[in-house]
Amino acid sequence: MRLGEKILKKYLKKSRLFAILLLGISMMLLISSVKAQTAVISVIDAVNGNDTIILPANTTAGTKFLVNVTIAGVEMLAGWQINITFDSRLLNVTAAADMILPANNIYKDLDPWGPVPDIGDGWVMWARAVGPAAPVDHFNGSGIICQIRFTTMKNGTGDPVQCDLVPTKVGTFPTELIDPDTTDIEFVVNNGHYVIPELPITTLLLVFLTITSIAIVLAKKTSMKHRKFLVAN
């Protein structure tokens, strides 16, 4: 065999090994990128699943509505802590009973444990965990973490009313996710948005005219009764 042919065969052999090595690295990177998919925590309307909770323009103070705090694309979730912040001038969480673990929550079959909800001025914090029988006790996938029942603090007439419902990642007790080894799980957040649209000026005018008409009718009736009384006496 000629020297040139030997060199060529040796080169081709090395090229195949290099190609196989590159293919292996590519597959590992692909698998790694799939595993590294970031989890997402969202605050959404419990009724229609939208991230914007829109109440009627004539909503009165004291009205209650429910939101779901959800997780998507998580792996090996053994514990969660959520801290939702909001504008306390517009919304309130009245009591611990307004923090709810629905029957279909992500830990429904895992007997979760944790402290009672903590409620502050413009924030609520709650935590639940499973285990420590790792790696059996954990959750993979997507679902509802918990629910929060808000109470409106301001009537919906006049200026628009709106604020964000934020799963905050800062502070003393931030929103966190951990795996069975208590290692932090990376995640991003999608804020919820609470909105009461501005009551249209035509509606306000109609309400004003209606109240004025009723007042005029009542005034006339009162005046007629007074006249009849004077005539009778």
Image: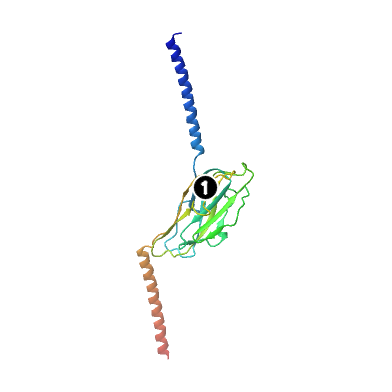
Task: Judge whether 3 appears above or below 80 on screen.
Answer: above
Classify mark 1: residues with Cα within 10 Å, few (<14), some (14-19) or many (20+): many
Give residue 197's position: percent from left, percent from top.
Answer: 40, 59
Please tell me whether mark 1 sits on a helix, a strand or a loop. Answer: strand
| Image quarter hosting the C terminus | bottom left
Give residue 231's position: percent from left, percent from top.
Answer: 40, 89
Give residue 42's position: percent from left, percent from top.
Answer: 49, 50
Task: Judge whether 188 appears above or below 165 on screen.
Answer: above
Task: Judge whether 89 appears above or below 179 on screen.
Answer: below
| Farthest residue, direction bottom | 233
**Mark 1 residue type:** Ile
| Farthest residue, direction top | 1
Front residue of 124/192: it is: 124
- Residue 195 seen in the figure: no
**Is the image coloured rainbow, by chain, by secondary structure, or in one colour?**
rainbow
User: Residue visible at 52% across and 51% down?
Assistant: 175
Front residue of 217/38: it is: 38
Front residue of 180/156: it is: 180
User: Residue visible at 48% across and 37% down?
Assistant: 33
Q: Disc 1 marks which residue?
A: 71
- Residue 17 seen in the figure: yes
Q: How many marks?
A: 1
Give residue 125's position: percent from left, percent from top.
Answer: 54, 56
Horizontal side of residue 213 vs 191, given as left or right: left
